[in-house]
Image (tube, helix red, strand yellow):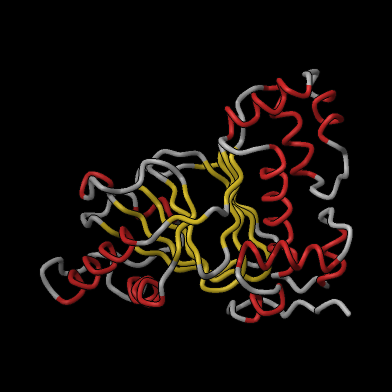
Amino acid sequence: MTRSTRGSDYQDIPRPIAALSDEYAPGHHDPHHHHKRAQLIYACAGITVVITEHASFVVPPQRAVWVPAGVEHEAHMRGHVSLRTLYIDASAFPDLPKTCRVIEVSALLRELLIEACRIPVEYDVCGRDGRVMDLLMTELLAMPATPLDVPMPQDPRLVKVCTAILRDPGQHEPLDGWADAAAMGRRTFTRTFRRETGVSFATWRQNVRLMEALSRLAVGQHVTTVAYDVGYNSPSAFTAMFRRAFGQAPTQYLASIPGTKPAEPHH
């Protein structure tokens, strides 16, 4: 089989793993779709935002997003994105995750993903290429999940609130205001929100802001501009939050990601 850049061409190949390599221009949008096979989406460069019915995921190059077979999703590209995608026959690997998640990508897994895209589509399962794919799956299954996702509630009243925040993460509406918007009392709102998403409303909103900030910084926006746009009162407060989440200041973190523009620090 000749290598293709269409995911649909890899769903029925006579191999348990298929790898696709493609390049996407800034702002590219892949609308809602699903695949027969499970999918691992990894960007060597740039930021990918993957959205499902239940959550949104921001995927910088040190991480990848796992999408089980049959799950509807869409993707948005922030900056130029060099994508490496695996399509995996779930029946061949019973231990695959059953839900969407963002996972760490070790240096070894990164090199294996890149190498998988060089291997023939109908590779020799018993030869060197088959052993590379086996090692890739061993490393993939060992990778821990990371909290770069925003779970979505199912209650329509909460969906309305969450959608409004996703559209404008920088809003300063207090908790009581959002409870009123949902036509719920404060206690009912907070209790229902935690039950449906697994996190508090404050944590959920902070994660939305973090993901929005990450995608903006990755395309070169100024740290100060991003800090205020996503709802922080000062660049220093934003930098402190970012450091807690990623272990580095924004400029240091972005400098370590291939394919991103250096974000300017605040002065």
Residue drawn 81% across the image and 55% down it: 230
Image coords of residue 253 (percent x, y): 64, 75
Residue drawn 73% across the image and 69% down it: 217
Residue drawn 35% across the image and 46% down it: 97
Q: Is residue 19 left or right of residue 23?
A: left
Observer-nearest residue: 259 or 33?
259
Counting the numbered discs, the total is: 0
Image coords of residue 52 (percent x, y): 56, 41
Placement of 256 over or under 100, stated as above or below: below
Instruction: Choose top left, top right, bottom left or bottom right for residue 216.
Output: bottom right
Placement of 192 over or under 119, stated as above or below: above
Residue extending farthest to the front is 187
Q: Is residue 28 left or right of residue 117?
A: right
Q: Is residue 38 left or right of residue 246?
A: left
Residue extending farthest to the left is 126
Image coords of residue 138 (percent x, y): 25, 63
Q: Quadrant of the C terminus?
A: bottom right
Observer-nearest residue: 194 or 230?
194
Observer-nearest residue: 181 or 15?
181
